[in-house]
Amino acid sequence: MPLTEGGIVIDIGTGDGRFVSAMARQHPDKFFIGVDANVKPLEKPSMRATRKPAKGGLKNALFVQAAVEDLPAEFDGVADEIHIHFPWGSLLGAVATGDAQVLSSLRRIASDDCALEIIFGGDRKKDRSELERLKIPEITLIYLHSYLIPKYVDAGFHYMRTGRLSRDEARKIDTSWSRRLSQNDEREFFFLEFET
């Protein structure tokens, strides 16, 4: 999904904040918020962002520790873009099954003209035990169209498009996980795009 001009971008499951930091440098007209339930990986990017601009600081980046199902009320209606890249653990379980509470939380923070992008990257063999633990069936285009997309539509998002990403396309998304995951020949990548 190409980044539009201006506005507030919220990256859910930001991890080490690489996407937020890189995009904030490239798009000084936007304000980027990285959100993760785990506070530990947020410490370094948050400290770097508060430095003076001459020392690599980013005035247009902020990192917040919060769970996706309980996002701060201050986020209500402010997101012009929401990105969820390569979710794992409970976040993967929520967005890949269309958890009603999480979808409601995402819709709550979305502005009236918000773009939502989700990118999955899975290896059916290596990830089998985790997918079974999270009760996620195999992610395929049939699953996305027949089961998952209707859940997002019911939650108030308008479906735009979905499809596969090549390993090269996945690698171009500037996150630490994209580089790791795209080294695996067996991993498949899917994207979903919605608007409000």
Image (tube, rainbow, N blue to C red):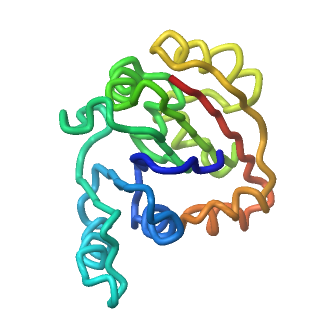
Residue 100 in sight in this render: yes
Front in this rendered view, residue 74 or 83: 74
Would you say 191 lies left or right of 113 here?
Answer: right
Mark count: 0
Q: Residue at left 50%, top 46%?
A: 87
> Where's the N terminus, which quadrant?
top right
Residue pushed farthest top? 154
Q: Residue at left 69%, top 14%?
A: 146
Residue 12 in sight in this render: no
Q: Residue at left 79%, top 62%?
A: 168
Residue pushed farthest left? 73
Question: At which x and y percent is residue 32?
Answer: 39, 56
Q: Residue at left 55%, top 42%?
A: 129
Question: At which x and y percent is residue 182?
Answer: 71, 62
Front in this rendered view, residue 156 or 13: 156
Would you say 47 lies left or right of 27 here?
Answer: left
